[in-house]
Image (spheres, rainbow, N blue to C red):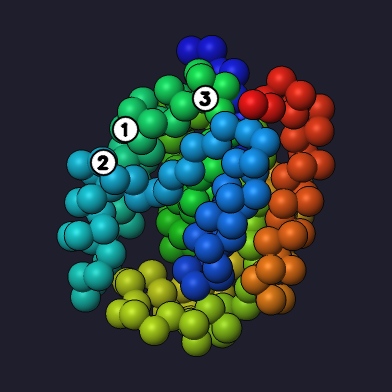
Amino acid sequence: MVKKGVFISIEGLDGSGKTTQAKMLVEKLQKDYNVFCTAEPSQGKIGSFIRNCCLYEEKRLPIEAEALLFAADRLEHMHKELAPALAKGKIVICDRYIYSSLAYQGSTGLSLDWIKAINSHALRPDFSLFVDVSPEKVLERLQRKKSVMETLENQQKVREFYLNFVEKGELFKIDGDRPKDVVADALYAKVMDLLEPVQLNLRK
């Protein structure tokens, strides 16, 4: 599989504004680049099952089953959408990807090595960015019905995992606790820095 484009994932807690930020980033990039925007859980069969049957049940599935479903959705997503877009030389922006699995399922005590193993055939992003907002603030923002993962305790643990990946240099942290336009400018500036070595080959 030859990858010609650039793959960027945007990570964050639920309610952190990452979905809005991903869309604003796409709008900025589309002026000069061919961009493909997507998200996980995907719109495929497995992703639809996760959204419709798993996230808003009163009790979580066994964590191992939850992790396997997300990994399976990721592989379907990769083959149907991500790899074809990258093969066409597009910049792919994905709202959530493998670090969501590592942070959310890892925060329950599930082995990170096992999560990595079941995702070993998935494409790796070239860059992953974490929009950081406090768990207390994100839960205040969530006006809809909260998913089984969206308790304060769960979100605090998930954030700790994300910040650990930041410390290891695997994620780039963007301070999301600012006005959305300020966050969007910071996110765009960081992405442009990361794209600098290859952007001439990606321009329209």
Counting residues from the N terminus, which is met first, the one under dot 2 or under dot 1?
2
Q: Which mark is residue 76?
A: 1
Q: Residue at x 57, y 47 (%)?
A: 26
Query: Label 3 sits on what residue type?
Result: Leu
The residue that label 3 is drawn on is 86
Label 2 and label 3: CA atoms lie apart by: 18 Å
The answer to whether mark 2 and mark 1 are in CB contact below 8 A is yes
The secondary structure type at the circle numbered 3 is: helix
Query: Label 2 sits on what residue type?
Result: Gly
Counting residues from the N terminus, which is met first, the one under dot 1 or under dot 3?
1
Placement of 20 over or under 86, stated as above or below: below
Q: Residue at x 38, y 31 (%)?
A: 81
Left or right: 90 in relation to 181:
left
Q: Nearer the viewer, residue 76 or 94?
A: 94
- Residue 158 in percent (x, y) is at 53, 65
Left or right: 96 in relation to 75:
right
Q: Which mark is residue 48?
A: none
Taking the image as drawn, is residue 161 in sight?
no
The residue that label 2 is drawn on is 44
